[in-house]
Image: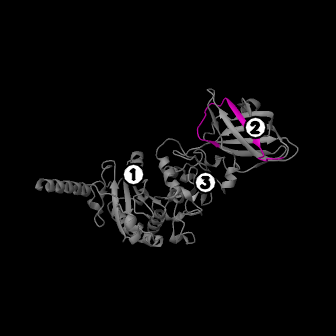
Amino acid sequence: MLKLCFFICLIYWVKSEEEQKCPQFTHLNIGDALSGTELHVQLLLYTRENHDCAEKLIEHNVAASEYLNKTKKIVFVIHGFRPTGSAPVWLGNMKKLLLSSEDINLIIVDWNRGATTVNYIAAVKNCRKVAEILKNYVDQMLVGGASLDSMHMIGVSLGAHVAGFVGQKYNGKLGRITGLDPAGPSFTREPPERRLDPTDAQFVDVIHSDIDVLGFKKPLGTIDFYPNGGMDQPGCPKTVFSGAQFFKCDHQRAVFLFLSSLKNKCDIITYPCDSYLDYKRGKCVDCDAFQPMSCPVLGYHADRWKKMLIPYSSPTKAYFDTSDKDPFCMHNYLLDITTWNKSIRRGFIKVKIMDYAGNTVESQMNSEASTFQQYKRVKILTGFHQDIEKIAKISLTFSTKNLIGPKHKLRILQMKLKYLNNPKRLQLCRYDFVLMEDTELTFKPIPCSERGT
């Protein structure tokens, strides 16, 4: 019996020693949320030298850190409201991907005690306090030789506003703030000084993925990205019967889009535009103003485009569509059609493309009907989940979606298909053909240059 007690005590002692050596993000539960938590902030430092075991920074003695290298970029990750007390599901991937992408100081700002509560307003009030504490740490880093230019704060939901408050304290000299679906409730009607704002850092990029519920609708940054228009993200539940995912899926999508940008599987290309509707109508897909760097990309490398935003009035809004799962990239094409019908036609065109091996991908049906008039060009934006580099055949289907009435024809004078992800790729054309309503027409395109187009 004595041996058993000794063995159990030994296990607890070893576990305690491990916990002291490797501080962990604070794990709480729904009970803590119901009772409420007092604010406590800890900063967990990870580098490539200690990527598996955090170093807890000492609040009033940051200089004592063993791993903090003030000559390297310092990236802070700040979470948001935690109504159940659990650690963010994305936290592990965020740490792993950031450290693998660049040799940085990564600091996880853990304010779970203070964010864990069923009282959202209490968590909102703590945001200012978290910012004050962060300023204390940053001040010490600056004294030790760090630079505001090399600091990047990534804030999620409430965390985006926390980052903004820190940026305000340094008069916008912070290098960069990334806001991942900044919280809307309690902030929507607030003036700039009481929320994230474009002047809070030298470069502020924001991803809005839930503007109709938990996120912030209006622009907040140097450039504001609106995936799929900023709401109703593909693959997210559409009804409340799906449980908790119905409420948080759209809101969290901004985080997963950002994470995808760190995986280097593909670039998520975006298009500066006044509105999502104009983008869908193909009015904003020409990025010549951004040459030679082409269109802005989403995520970690968005700051490469900051110098090109000078021609645009601030704020710049950028729109794009995504697929329903990681890596979320779409292969975008612009279908440019000129018709010669004497009568006006309204309808939709569905596009399929096929390679020489017979592999076929199908576009999504455009969400809005196009109006086809005689000798007028119509641009239709369409996207595919995978790329076909060498297109052998194209299929088009025209539909009015009318269930009754006569079937119509769409007489095409010229059709051009342009790959937007890589404008250098050859445009494909077809001339003088007719689309019968609800009948798929498949043909072999020719390079547009062959007809001098």
Q: x, y percentage for residue 214?
A: 54, 63
260 over 241 or under it: above or below: above
Q: Which residue is mark 1?
A: 92
Q: CA distance from mark 1 to mark 3?
A: 29 Å
Q: Is residue 200 left or right of residue 9?
A: right
The residue tagged with tag 2: helix, strand or loop? Answer: strand
Q: Is residue 147 left or right of residue 328?
A: left
Label 2 Cα neighbours within 10 Å, binned few <14 / some 14-19 / many ≥20: many
Outermost residue on the right side: it is: 342
**Quick one: quadrant of the N terminus?**
bottom left
Give the residue type that dot 1 points to: Gly
The residue tagged with tag 1: helix, strand or loop? Answer: helix
Residue 128 visible in the current orientation: yes
Q: CA distance from mark 3 to mark 2?
A: 27 Å
Mark linked to residue 415: 2
Residue at (23, 57) in percent of width and height: 16
**Quick one: quadrant of the C terminus?**
top right
Instruction: Identify the mark nearer the N-term, 1 or 3.
Output: 1
Determine which quarter of the picture holds residue 215. bottom right
Q: Which residues are magenta?
A: 383-404
Give the residue type that dot 3 points to: Ala
Instruction: Identify the mark nearer the N-term, 3 or 2.
Output: 3
Q: CA distance from mark 2 to mark 1?
A: 48 Å
Label 3 Cα neighbours within 10 Å, binned few <14 / some 14-19 / many ≥20: many
Determine which quarter of the picture holds residue 100. top left
Q: Which residue is mark 3?
A: 318
The residue tagged with tag 3: helix, strand or loop? Answer: strand
